Amino acid sequence: MLLKSNLASSLPDVGTRELSFQRFKMKITILVFFLNVIPILACIEEPIDAKECLGILQQQEIVGENGTSVELSNEPNGNPFPKATPESQGISSGVLDRLAELVSGFVDAEEIVGAELLIIKNQRTVMHEVFGLDAPNGDRALVKNTIFSIRSMTKPLAGAMAQILIDEGVLKLSDPVSKYLESFNNDRSRDITIEHLLTHRSGLPMKSAGRLWSDYSSYKHIREVADYWGEHGPQLFTPGEQYHYADANVDTLGAVIEQAVGESTEGIIERRLFRTLGMNDSITLLSKGDVRVARVAGKNAGGRGRWRQFWRWQGTPYFSFPMFAQGFYSTTIDYARFLQLVMDGGVTNGKRILSKAAIARMLTPVSQTTMPTGFAGLGASYGQLMQLYEKEGKVVAFGHSGSDATYAWAWPEQELMVLYFTQSRGSVTMSRMEAVIDSLLARPIQIEED
């Protein structure tokens, strides 16, 4: 109450504020006009598809009369995490400068091609910066709100949709997959359950000897992928006995959801998760005519000093159908919306999306993993399609990574999220980022709690 009172006493009278606001709106209108005209002129200079031209405009920023930043975003719902100074949220600007120097150093040393870094504290954006290029040896700088291939960060999104259906009784953890997919009704695969898929304890391998691993284009639908795995069967161990991370689990889960609901899995995820959370820049499958494809980053692979771009949108998607283990695209802000849903116990904008029980299922450690981590004193484990970082059985942080080098972490007790997205497949910067984030942002609070 004291803070609000002091703030109110510092404001000018209503009449003065109204006049200032009207002048401010006029300035915004003029700037918006020029920000829209310039990209249009650029499109005239360099002829490209008209729909792609509409997608060129990236998020711009202007500074208001009171020193606050006003964001003009290409996101229909804008940024749900308004900007704030680091100090106002208990973070030193020097800490963020250190993180910026670290990522800039990765670019300068050619350890990554480019990166977008978003840090959110108390649901306020305290840092949102981009570094480097979109392509190796190119001249096109990476821009804010780029749409990235998030690869395995797709898994928690598919898992959340499964949790919604479990909440509603459409699916049960104990359901055998063979209840929904006939291809699993054999002596090899009959014992695999929904819970085994969610926890990577089915016994299905990561790689196969068949054409699936080397040629996804030979398939047309996720059901064909799942049927392959059902016929292949768990080759590693009896379902439930061990943990083995495998894309097969989540692609199969996608086929199960479609069969159980009678609607395409990508359709139900877009309708019940993306739209509900305002994830308007998240895409299950790239397609012509979608203006967002102009903002999709190219895919780079290699390693330090030897990067090459192996894919860029030219009218053909990388995967020809939605892959629920690795096929989605998203932005740092959109993925932060999802992490915030989990941190808020399954509620967004006052509406419950996931039950408390569902959140507990996602965030309860089931298996220890060998995932390397730079978080000192924390062990890596896995829940139900969520990577977890725990200390003595208590989950301190959660998140997920993607093999095209996208990473997201959340610390619920600190109301802290860090999203570090690159398109540098083969990069080995994750653990160093974790170590610095841990020492500068997360660990001081952990020490106080200890």
Image (cartoon, rainbow, N blue to C red):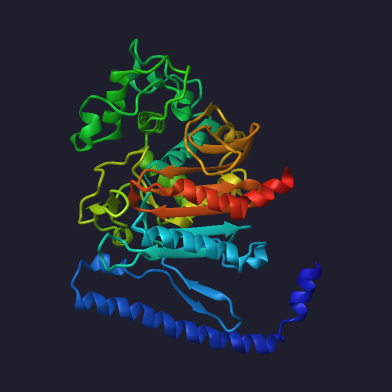
Along the line of sight, which residue is nearer the eye, 264 or 176? 176
Q: Residue 111 at x, y = what percent? A: 36, 54
Question: Would residue 195 be seen by someone viewing this image from the given angle?
Answer: yes
Q: Residue at x 36, y 48 (%)?
A: 427
Question: Would residue 75 be seen by someone viewing this image from the given angle?
Answer: no
Q: Residue 134 at x, y = what percent? A: 31, 61
Instruction: Tell me where residue 176 sits by quadrant.
Output: top left
Quarter of the image that includes the N terminus: bottom right
Along the line of sight, which residue is nearer the eye, 405 or 432? 432
Q: Is residue 275 above or below residue 51?
A: above
Q: Residue 40 at x, y = what percent? A: 28, 77
Q: Residue 302 at x, y = what percent? A: 28, 48
Q: Is residue 93 left or right of residue 131?
A: right
- Residue at the extreme top of the image, as rendered: 187
Along the line of sight, which residue is nearer the eye, 37 or 325? 325
Q: Residue at x 62, y 50 (%)?
A: 442
Quarter of the image that includes the C terminus: top right
